[in-house]
């Protein structure tokens, strides 16, 4: 599978089953919005069983998947989401705790995964 084929498949899946969210990076000193982007995301709550193995996450934490290409070229956005970024899901602001690159195809990242509370 080529990187573009994998990315296109993720885009189709997010278009069909994802929801629109807003990802914001805040300036640490003033908490003003430094960068903001709307994108499609797959959001699901962690199960009780999953949370047992992750003591740093609390009940109600969610796992979020976004397309890596949705952040590429966004003005004022650099790199992966970081701890403290804010993700608005269905009108509720959630804080990014962790973010990591999903699978790579060759040297191309396909998706980004996050834990949010």
Image (cartoon, rainbow, N blue to C red):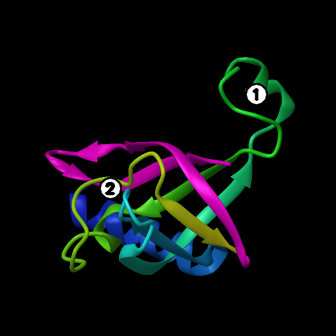
Q: Position of residue 70 (x, y in %)?
A: 34, 73
* Numbered mark located on residue 77 in the image: none
Could you say whether the residue bearing mark 2 is in a helix, strand or loop? Answer: loop
Q: Position of residue 12 (x, y in %)?
A: 49, 76
In the image, which residues are magenta? 90-117
Residue that mark 1 sits on: 51
> Residue at position x 72%, y 54% from top?
44
Instruction: Check whether the beta carbons of the residues at disc 2 and disc 1 lie within 8 A of each other.
Output: no
Q: Position of residue 30 (x, y in %)?
A: 41, 66
Residue that mark 2 sits on: 110
User: Looking at the rendering, in which quadrant would you find the N terminus?
Assistant: bottom left
When the figure is inspected, residue 63 is found, relative to residue 2, above or below; the finding is above
- Please name which of the two marks, 2 or 1, marks the residue nearer to the observer: 1
Tell me if mark 2 has few (under 14), some (14-19) or many (20+) residues whose alpha carbon lies within 10 angstroms of its own: many
> Residue at position x 44%, y 73% from top?
11
When the figure is inspected, residue 90 is found, relative to residue 51, above or below; the finding is below
Horizontal side of residue 41 vs 51, given as left or right: left
**Is 82 in front, or is 26?**
26
**Is 86 in front, or is 47?**
86
Could you say whether the residue bearing mark 1 is in a helix, strand or loop? Answer: helix
Q: Position of residue 39 (x, y in %)?
A: 47, 78
- In primary-sequence order, the first of circles 2 and 1 is 1
Horizontal side of residue 31 vs 78, given as left or right: right
Quarter residue 14 falls in: bottom right
**Is 51 in front, or is 12?**
51
Magenta stretch encompasses residue 106: yes
Horizontal side of residue 41 vs 72, given as left or right: right
Tell me if mark 1 has few (under 14), some (14-19) or many (20+) residues whose alpha carbon lies within 10 angstroms of its own: some
Horizontal side of residue 26 vs 74, given as left or right: right
């Amino acid at each position: 599978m080529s990187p573009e084929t994998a990315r296109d498949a993720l885009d189709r899946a997010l278009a069909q089953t994802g929801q629109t969210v807003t990802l914001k990076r805040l300036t640490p000193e003033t908490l003003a919005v430094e960068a903001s982007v709307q994108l499609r995301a797959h959001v699901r709550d962690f199960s009780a069983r999953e949370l047992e193995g992750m003591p740093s996450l609390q009940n109600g934490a969610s796992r979020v998947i976004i397309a890596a290409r949705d952040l590429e070229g966004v003005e004022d956005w650099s790199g992966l989401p970081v701890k403290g970024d804010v993700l608005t899901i269905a009108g509720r602001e959630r804080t990014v705790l962790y973010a990591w690159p999903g699978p790579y195809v060759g040297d191309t990242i396909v998706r980004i995964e996050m834990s949010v509370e």
